[in-house]
Image (cartoon, helix red, strand yellow):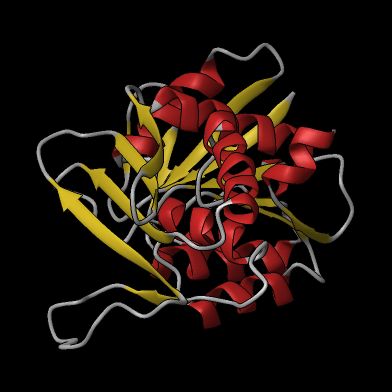
Amino acid sequence: MINVLINGCNGRMGKEVAKVVQEQEDMTVIAGFDRTESDNGYFTVFADFAKLPVDKIDVIIDFSVPEATFAMLSFAKKHHIPMVIATTGFSQEERTQIQKEAKELPIFQSANMSFDINLMGKIVAELAKNLPDTDVEIIEAHHNQKIDAPSGTAILLADKINAELPEKCDYVFDRHANRSKRGKHEIGFSSIRGGNIVGTHTVQFIGGNETFEVTHTSYSRTVFAEGAVKAARFLTNMPNGFYDMNDLLKH
């Protein structure tokens, strides 16, 4: 049996992960961690690292905020517990730090745990190679409780595109203060926040006479939870190192 600790267990995605884990025959939620301690009838939620059942935790699934992720990462590193990081909103420096920590424990990180989104990343990367003279714009929409903008998934898609271009593009997040024409080598981002939108991402390749766009829409958070649980199962058998969705898809 694989014992899972969920960081951010009281949040929307934390609750979804708990539901998916409980449906697995070979996994169980051994504990949760969040800002408020409680007992939801299935597992105990802790707010103090010192109270966590360290010896019983096989893997950590993190759906929280960057500050909480790094606090949990310190705990995971101290006790050498594999950690799946599904939180978004990290700076480049924070992403680099996470990769450095992976030298001392297995870490799986993906800005989006959906298989289809990662397939979309491959598709738009291929399109970028074949449509080099177009302007690339990424539009993403999420619910009104999401803190970070643009989404980690939007950055993931941009990174996939940028990796295939002969000349690297700058990322432009805010045109409001930029009183100049669009540069040739840039990827623009637009963020929409409203209601209970689970997640929609559109990549546009805009030419002089036509536009080619690819859109992915998520209707349920379950797909992200299922991906995180698959990653957790995968990570328990891996040595120290940094892993992402590409590693999981190959496994």
Query: Of residues 185 and 219, which is closer to you in this image?
Result: 185
Q: Residue 211: x, y in percent? A: 36, 44
Query: Of residues 95 and 102, which is closer to you in this image?
Result: 95
Question: Which residue is at 37% across, 37% downward?
Answer: 13
- Which image quarter is the C terminus in? top right
Residue 51 seen by the camera: no
Task: Locate residue 119 relative to residue 107 in the image: left or right.
Answer: left
- Count up the numbered dots: 0
Residue 140 seen by the camera: yes
Task: Locate residue 27 relative to residue 240 in the image: left or right.
Answer: left
Specify the quadrant of the image occupied by residue 227. Answer: top right
21 versus 132 height, above or below: above
Residue that lies at the very extreme toward the front in this rendered image: 209
Task: Locate residue 233 relative to residue 202 in the image: left or right.
Answer: right
Q: Residue 161: x, y in percent? A: 57, 58
Q: Residue 74: x, y in percent? A: 60, 71
Q: Residue 197: x, y in percent? A: 21, 34
- Which image quarter is the N terminus in? top right
Task: Locate residue 124 relative to residue 45 in the image: left or right.
Answer: right
Question: Which residue is at 35% across, 23% downward?
Answer: 220
190 versus 195 height, above or below: below
Specify the quadrant of the image occupied by residue 195. Answer: top left
Question: Which residue is at 19% across, 86% downward?
Answer: 178
Query: Of residues 159 and 68, which is closer to you in this image?
Result: 159
